[in-house]
Image (tube, grey):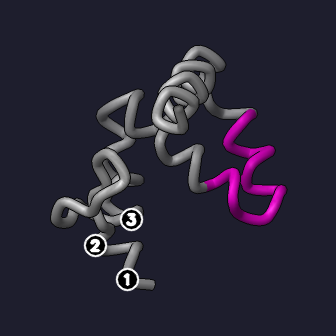
Protein backbone atom coordinates (compact mmCIF):
# COMPACT_ATOMS: atom_id res chain seq x y z
CA UNK A 1 0.00 0.00 0.00
CA UNK A 2 2.83 2.40 0.77
CA UNK A 3 4.05 2.40 -2.84
CA UNK A 4 0.70 3.86 -3.86
CA UNK A 5 1.55 7.08 -2.03
CA UNK A 6 5.37 7.17 -1.65
CA UNK A 7 7.87 5.12 -3.65
CA UNK A 8 11.67 4.86 -3.34
CA UNK A 9 13.72 6.63 -6.03
CA UNK A 10 16.39 4.32 -7.46
CA UNK A 11 19.35 5.63 -9.43
CA UNK A 12 22.14 3.28 -10.50
CA UNK A 13 20.98 0.53 -8.14
CA UNK A 14 21.02 2.79 -5.08
CA UNK A 15 18.10 4.40 -3.33
CA UNK A 16 18.17 8.20 -3.49
CA UNK A 17 15.23 9.46 -1.47
CA UNK A 18 11.61 9.08 -2.47
CA UNK A 19 9.22 10.13 -5.22
CA UNK A 20 5.44 10.31 -5.54
CA UNK A 21 3.81 6.87 -5.44
CA UNK A 22 1.94 4.99 -8.12
CA UNK A 23 -1.37 6.68 -7.37
CA UNK A 24 0.19 10.08 -8.03
CA UNK A 25 1.91 8.77 -11.18
CA UNK A 26 -1.48 7.68 -12.43
CA UNK A 27 -2.90 11.18 -11.84
CA UNK A 28 0.16 12.80 -13.48
CA UNK A 29 -0.21 10.43 -16.44
CA UNK A 30 -3.22 12.36 -17.68
CA UNK A 31 -0.86 15.27 -18.35
CA UNK A 32 2.23 13.42 -19.60
CA UNK A 33 2.57 10.56 -22.13
CA UNK A 34 5.80 9.45 -20.43
CA UNK A 35 4.03 9.03 -17.10
CA UNK A 36 1.23 7.08 -18.79
CA UNK A 37 3.92 4.75 -20.19
CA UNK A 38 5.29 4.29 -16.67
CA UNK A 39 1.81 3.38 -15.45
CA UNK A 40 1.79 0.60 -18.05
CA UNK A 41 4.85 -0.95 -16.40
CA UNK A 42 2.91 -1.38 -13.18
CA UNK A 43 -0.31 -2.42 -14.91
CA UNK A 44 1.63 -5.18 -16.67
CA UNK A 45 2.44 -6.69 -13.27
CA UNK A 46 -1.22 -6.86 -12.31
CA UNK A 47 -3.94 -9.28 -13.28
CA UNK A 48 -4.16 -9.64 -17.09
CA UNK A 49 -7.53 -7.99 -17.87
CA UNK A 50 -6.15 -4.62 -16.76
CA UNK A 51 -3.21 -5.00 -19.16
CA UNK A 52 -5.59 -5.72 -22.04
CA UNK A 53 -7.61 -2.58 -21.24
CA UNK A 54 -4.41 -0.51 -21.01
CA UNK A 55 -3.29 -1.88 -24.40
CA UNK A 56 -6.61 -1.00 -26.01
CA UNK A 57 -6.80 2.61 -24.79
CA UNK A 58 -3.12 3.61 -25.06
CA UNK A 59 -1.53 4.86 -28.28
CA UNK A 60 1.07 2.27 -29.34
CA UNK A 61 3.88 4.85 -29.61
CA UNK A 62 3.58 5.48 -25.85
CA UNK A 63 3.86 1.77 -25.12
CA UNK A 64 6.88 1.32 -27.40
CA UNK A 65 8.67 4.34 -25.89
CA UNK A 66 8.03 2.98 -22.39
CA UNK A 67 9.42 -0.42 -23.42
CA UNK A 68 12.60 1.22 -24.72
CA UNK A 69 12.93 3.31 -21.56
CA UNK A 70 12.69 0.30 -19.24
CA UNK A 71 14.99 -1.80 -21.44
CA UNK A 72 17.65 0.92 -21.20
CA UNK A 73 17.25 1.01 -17.41
CA UNK A 74 17.70 -2.76 -17.25
CA UNK A 75 21.07 -2.58 -19.02
Q: Residue at x 74, y 49 (%)?
A: 51
For the residue labelled by badge 3, is the local secondary structure a helix, a strand or a loop? helix
- Label placed on residue 19: none
Compared to 73, does 25 lie above or below? below
Q: Which comes sooner in the sequence, label 3 or label 1?
A: 1
Distance between mark 2 and mark 3 Cα atoms: 9 Å
- Label placed on residue 6: 2
Horizontal arrangement in the rendering, residue 47 relative to residue 71 (left or right): right
Q: Which comes sooner in the sequence, label 2 or label 3?
A: 2
Q: Residues within 10 Å of mark 3 (few under 14, many from 20)?
A: some
Q: Residues within 10 Å of mark 1 (few under 14, many from 20)?
A: few
Compared to 75, does 7 lie above or below? below
For the residue labelled by badge 1, is the local secondary structure a helix, a strand or a loop? helix
Q: Residue at x 28, y 72 (%)?
A: 6
- Label placed on residue 2: 1
Q: Nearer the viewer, mark 2 or mark 3?
A: 2
First to last magenta residue range: 43-55
Locate residue 4: give its quadrant.
bottom left
Question: Which residue bears the numbered disc 3?
Answer: 23
View extreme (bottom): residue: 1
Q: Residues within 10 Å of mark 2 (few under 14, many from 20)?
A: some
Locate residue 18: give its quadrant.
bottom left
Q: Position of residue 24 (x, y in %)?
A: 31, 60
Q: Residue at x 46, y 38 (%)?
A: 36
Q: Nearer the viewer, residue 6 or 11?
A: 11
For the residue labelled by badge 2, is the local secondary structure a helix, a strand or a loop? strand
Asked if residue 54 is among those painted magenta in the image, a careful observer would answer yes
> Magenta stretch: dominant SS?
helix
If the image is split into quadrants, where does the N terminus sit?
bottom left
Contact between marks 2 and 1 (CB within 8 A): the answer is yes
Q: Position of residue 11 (x, y in %)?
A: 28, 48
Amino acid sequence: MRRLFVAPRWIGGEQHGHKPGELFEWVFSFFSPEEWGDVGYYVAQMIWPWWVLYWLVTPKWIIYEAIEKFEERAL
